Image (cartoon, rainbow, N blue to C red):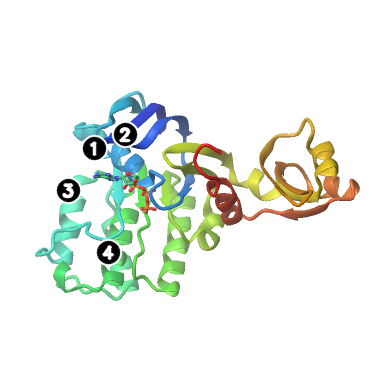
Amino acid sequence: MKIEVKSLTKKYGDHRALNDISFILDGPKIYGLLGRNGAGKTTFMDILSGHIMASNGEILINGENPFDNQRLTESICLIKEGQNFKRDLKIKNVLKIYSYFYPNWDQELAENLIKEYNLDLNSKIKTLSKGMESALGITVGLASKAPITIFDEPYIGLDAPSRKKFYEIMLEEYQEKPRMIIFSTHLIDEVSLLFEEVLILREGSLVLQEESEILRNNTIAVSGTIEEVETFISGKEVIEKKQLAGMMTAYIYGTVEEAKMFGLNVEGVPIQELMIYLTERKKGA
Ligand SMILES: Nc1ncnc2c1ncn2[C@@H]1O[C@H](COP(=O)(O)OP(=O)(O)OP(=O)(O)O)[C@@H](O)[C@H]1O
């Protein structure tokens, strides 16, 4: 699947939840969509899933607009944080409805996950705890086998072992049959190893799109005097730099070895940290 995001803007009144963003997502891949609260992640995923319309610009999925496009929405499964299912339905009815909707639905996987998460097929949604409802969301998302599966912070209330199980099964499923998985979460440290590519939104703008491997191996923070650091980073791709009391820290694409040879303090930058550095800047800075 190829998703082209072209000058996409979503306005709520005067507020721009998404502000003229453009990028491409391509092929089966696990994407991490990151950003602080209110950055525009859910808004993007809602437009992508055809649930809401853009104010300007467009999203094309294999060349088509997803809004009100039944054939395309069969290829997209969006699981949100809670409230995915009608309160009066039983779990078994939920599975049945989704099995009709998604052509690649995997009933065996759904039933295995229901057992794994200790859910009862006859329980009504309104009787489930938050964690149980999240477990059902995860079950539906994985079993949909939708070519574009989107998890928007899907595990409210889900405990650590259950989340681990989710990551394991998601990876197993992905290895067996790769698809596009877009994953938005604030538990970045926990899940970042699964991401193949990372996008970071800040206040409705895209501030980074990069392969995780490059981020893991080639993103470094170098510190020293302003002069030393400026000399070292000259001609390099700089992600962000900060100055304090004559000292500078710069986040750049480069290797630890290279910076060490230059006599600078150098550290790798975990994706979680990178997200914080890239999103902490004040408006207009
Ligand atoms: N229906 C709406 N009406 C008005 N404003 C909205 C609406 N939905 C979202 N917004 C605003 O748009 C901005 C982006 O919200 P969005 O939910 O997309 O962010 P997010 O990155 O998903 O945040 P979080 O991590 O907290 O879930 C926020 O400022 C939010 O208040």
- Residue named by callout 4: 136
Q: Are marks 3 and 2 in contact (CB under 8 Å)?
A: no
Vertical placement of 159 versus 149: above or below? below
Disc with the residue nearer the chain's start (1 vs 4)? 1
- Asked which secondary structure carries label 4, the reply is helix
Tell me the amino acid under the disc marked 4.
Leu
Task: Identify which residue is drawn at 27% across, 64% down.
Answer: 136
Comparing marks 4 and 2, which lies closer to the viewer? 2
Of 198 and 223, which appears nearest the observer? 223
State whether residue 267 is above or below residue 31.
below
**Assess mark 3: CB under 8 A from ligand 1?**
no
Residue hosting label 1: 52
Q: What residue type is labelled 2?
A: Lys
Which of disc 2 and disc 4 is earlier in sequence?
2
Give the Cα distance between marks 3 and 2: 32 Å
Q: Which of 199 and 214 is in front in this view?
A: 199
Q: In this view, does 253 lie above or below 67?
A: below
Say which mark, if any, is on residue 100: 3
Q: Quadrant of residue 153?
A: bottom left
Does the closest atom of ligand 1 sit within 8 Å of the Cβ of label 2? Answer: yes
Q: Can residue 126 be seen in this view?
A: yes
Direction from residue 252 to residue 275 in the image, left or right: left
The residue at which mark 2 appears reads as 10
Q: Nearer the viewer, mark 1 or mark 4?
A: 1
Residues under labels 1 and 4: Cα distance? 24 Å
Is the residue under label 1 in contact with that under label 2 (CB below 8 Å)? yes
Q: Position of residue 221 (x, y in %)?
A: 72, 50
